[in-house]
Each structure stands twice: as structure tokens, then as C-alpha cells.
Image (tube, helix red, strand yellow):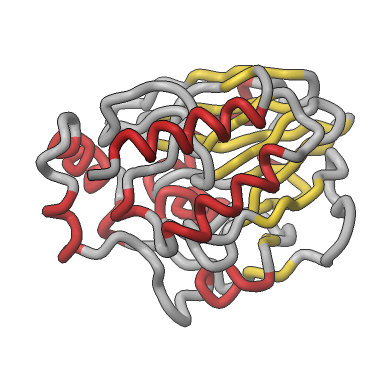
Amino acid sequence: MTTAALSITQIENTHLVRCGHANWVLVEEGADLTLIDGGYPANGTDVERSIEQIGHQLGDVRAILVTHAHVDHIGGIADIVTRLQVPVLMDPLEVPHAKREYLQQLSPAKVPLLLWRRGAPKWLLDVIGAGALKGAELPRAQAFAAGGALDVPGRIVPIPTHGHTDGHSAYLVPEAGVIASGDALVTGHATSSVAGPQFLVCPFNHDRGATDQALDNIAAAPAGALFPGHGPVYEGSLAAAVEQARAGRTRMRP
């Protein structure tokens, strides 16, 4: 079995972990950790390796936050929660999605809409190897409390970014001035030919219009860095990042 390479970028108490086609975020507060997302089903052991690489152990995780319940964000969590008794928190609207009472995810019928894109065929083979077809669910999913910082390591603040899924949420880490943006705003993807702040290509988004409107909340947040669900760290004005993403979408429209 080949061990996937990890790339970890740190800003203050917050770490962006990139592993293959998946990203997740680790937030420190003393000896304790909050994990945000967890990659594909095959990434459970990679999440644990990333925790060890920043000087912690799996047992230091005190809470898990979910941006949204797509398989490339909760697959590794589904493995981890079999070994940890910690809260698994998300936007109230995302809880039934995580429990698979319904599914808002790219269906096999829509895959042909992507295959013409450069990089998409290899991406598809890679993510199937990472367990994308196995699916994932989080029976212990819970809604986080509305309003203000959460009682988790890092005092993380949810930012509503509904659209990519009905209950998608980004998260502000105040100490680091970082937003973990999930798939509301990314900086790269194997199915995209451009780099920098951007939307995921349309077949991935449940509600295209709402995804666009949600970026106003990211642009207004008191942060200077973006830790996306896909792609590398972005540092700079988040208002400018949102403007760049919207300009890119406008140029791609027929």
C-alpha cells in the first residue's frame, strides 16, 4: 500500500493539510485540536498521520467540524469517529445530509459533464481509488449552536455559506485570521484549468446562485487567509479573492 504524501501549511494555530485530491484543517489550542473535514474514505489514516506530523496524537482531537457532507470531506471522519467519542458538528441544515436522509452530490449521471475537462479522467480514477464510490455517512452528526464562537478548541466561528450544499458552512479561526472555506470558494481542482480563487465547476454545486451569494459572507469576514477544500492556501484580501472568483465565472459563461 502506497502512503499518500502530505503537504501541511501553518498560519498561527491553524494547519491546512493537502493530501491527493482532499484537504482538511487542524486547529490547535494548547494540547487540544479541532479537526475540520477529513477527506475521502481512504484518508482516515492520512488524517491521523497529519495530526502526528504537527506534534499531536489522534486522542487530542476534541471536536470535529464539517463544512459539508460530500464524500471527499467526511469519508475520513467516518473512519475516525469509530475510534473517538467526540462531537461531530455542522450547520443544522447539513445534519440530515450527513446522516444520508438525502444526498446532494455529483451523481454518476452527471459525470459525463466533467470528462471533457483536462485532468478529469485521471481525477475520476484517483477518487474511485480513494473510496468515492463507497460513500460515507455520519450517524452521530449534530447541529452546532447558532450565534458566535463554538465551544471547541480554537473558538471557531461558523460562517453560513449555503449553496454548494443546502447546509454548507465555512469556519473562521479568529486567532489565525483564517477561513476554512470548504467548497464554497477553492483555489484549484483537478477538473479546473486555472489556479487561484474560484468556484468549483458547476456540476459540483447544488445551487449555483446561492453558492455565488454566499461568498459575500466570506468577503466580509475578518480574515486574511483562505484554507480551501481544494487547492493551496490563499493569503490576501478575501474581498479580492471573491471578486476574482466571480470574474472567472463570468468569463466562462457562454
Question: Where in the figure is residue 192, as x and y percent of width and height?
Answer: 29, 32
Image check: 73 left or right of 59? left
Task: Tell which of 30 and 183 is nearer to you.
Answer: 183
Q: Residue at x 60, y 41 (%)?
A: 181
Question: Where in the figure is residue 49, as x and y percent of width and height?
Answer: 54, 29
Q: Residue at x 72, y 30 (%)?
A: 178
- Is 214 rendered above or below residue 218? below
The quarter of the displayed image where residue 176 is located: top right
Question: Where in the figure is residue 44, as x and y percent of width and height?
Answer: 48, 44
Q: Is residue 60 visible?
A: no
Image check: 87 left or right of 53? right
Q: How many marks?
A: 0
Q: Is residue 129 visible?
A: yes
Question: Where in the figure is residue 163, as x and y percent of width and height?
Answer: 51, 60
Point out the image quarter for the C terminus. Answer: top left
- Is 225 rendered above or below residue 183? above
Image check: 54 left or right of 71? right
Task: Tell which of 100 and 148 is nearer to you.
Answer: 148
Q: Residue at x 29, y 26 (%)?
A: 2
Point out the image quarter for the N terminus. Answer: top left
